[in-house]
Image (cartoon, rainbow, N blue to C red):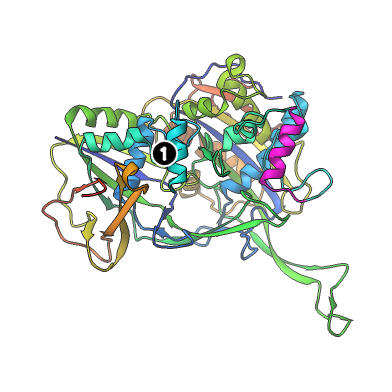
Amino acid sequence: MIKIQSTLPATGNAYILFGFEAIQARPNLDPYSSTLRMNDETGQVFTSDVHIKHHVRRGLKAYAVAENLPHAAETVFYEKEDEAGNPCNFDLRLKRIREVAGISKPDMKDALNNTLDLPLFGYVHAIKGENFNVTNAANTLFRPVTFHDCEIYSLGRNNAFPTLDNKTLKIKDSAGSATVDSLEYGFFLALWEINLNMLRVNASASKLIDWEKAGAAGWFEALVNGMWRAYSSDRYPSFTQRSQFAQFVLGWMPEGEVSYANPASLYDRLEEKRINTHSGAVAALEKVLPDFLSGWGCSGSNVFVKHRAANFPVALPGAEA
Amino acid sequence: MSILIFELAGEMAMWRNVYESMGSFSCLGPAPGNLAGVIGAALGFASPRSQAAEKPDAKQLKSWDKAGLPWPVSPELLAWEEANDFHVACRWIGKFPKRVPWNINGCKEINRSDNLRLQQQVILDPAYEVAAALPAEEAERVAAALRKPAFPLCLGASFCRAIVRNVRIEDAVPESPFWAFRADGGALGEATPFSRHIVNPDSCFERIRSDGYWIYPTPDQPGVIAAEPLVRGWVRAGE
């Protein structure tokens, strides 16, 4: 469990840099083209805020279970299916959240106050007569991206059960084979921005994490543990996600002007742009990460969370959580 | 009057076009109403239908809803725009403008187990310089708010976080052929509908009025040096 001991201020923006690696994986394919999302000029692979929040939601639920929060298995609003595999919609989720929270007198803020994902990531309560919106308090500032050029392989795959042609009732000769692009190795950096005032607005009436007792630190704890769990102990077993691993998480509260540098721009500072291994990524980050963090106003005195995987030796500012 | 100037940037922008039914193709730059919204978020003016609204008038919201205004603009922001006679100018200062597809699997309204797929065309690496004419004291207050905003700042959509840099106060708007200019007739070049907040929505139950276009000159299609690049950023219904 990653613990946050610091007290955070009431206003301003905090930042979290989350590093994770993907090995022989296909993270966040374009839903229309089913190809990896890439910068064609630099060979950097990127994902979307939607993608990483989707995974963090799974981690939030795992965190809720580990922390024994009330109705832990139903602490995430956006679930596509119920426990029996039936599709859900907005109304069904709202009904379910009210059931598990033991709410007999419905209130329009029930979903917001009884889940972990909505105060963090926001939502629109689009119900006529009681519509309201919750702005996301936490979002990636830039698309999560590899800081280096990546090797992409085209892999041919065969399906064990080729498809049947419904008209001729014969098995298609070429059916079941496909060529897919696969990321050989990528070290992703996701820079999150969290607006502390917005977090207070969204989370102060939560029934899951008591704002009066835990404050913003309690919510940051949920967020970073959710992030970490989604990419470590509670990874999704799909081909696209199972080989992605959390490497480090670092949170800080800068004062004054910052560089606003996109982690993607670290590419420009690399001597060897193409990185294919964990050791190569670590060696490169040892060189380029300190200046990047310094530009972002990150120093030992303002770091409120720092956690590294056992195989990530790069020195980071602040005390280990 | 002081001229508050700041740079507005980010990784991508999604300035929705009010004339495009799918709302999936971003204009190159913000309309005056969008810029007022950025300033309002920095100052902490919440929409009454937002979780951040402290004591929304439930009766008024109900009547607005009934009249066809389910998502009203912050009354504080509207009052601020009129009281300070908010005037604004904006210019593109980025590289050659580029739109890219931004396709995502959304999950906002799920009635089937399939993913809800959203296809959007966003502006990549947007960068603007914004100038706002305000009373001196108010310009200082907004400058401080932009440096430490009350709410997250966005470039048209909440997934496009904004970065505000180089906030300063000057005596005049810098001369440039790239300030967006208003065109009443047909659109040309990078046209953004000229949308401004209606400060008295009670009288018409509309949030914005779009009349004409705000044309953003770009490096390949430069404009002309206008005598007055500032435009009034608000409008009163019935004018």
Q: Tell me the element at label 1.
A: loop
Whole-percent x, y for residue B25 in the image: 44, 61
Residue positioned 51% across, 19% down in the render: A8
**Crowd rating for badge 1 (residues with CA inside 10 Å; few <14, some 14–19, many 20+):** many
Q: Is residue A92 magenta?
A: yes
Q: Which residue is mark 1?
A: B153
- The chain letter under disc 1 is B
Observer-nearest residue: B180 or B79?
Answer: B79
Magenta segment, which residues? A87-102
**Where is residue A140 drawn, in percent x and y?**
53, 41
Q: Is residue B113 magenta?
A: no
Q: Residue B94, position in %: x, y?
A: 33, 53
Q: Residue at x 64, y 50 (%)?
A: B107
Q: Residue furthest top?
A: A213
Up/down of B17 relative to A300, above or below = below
Q: Please name the residue shown 76% across and 54% down the image.
A: A239
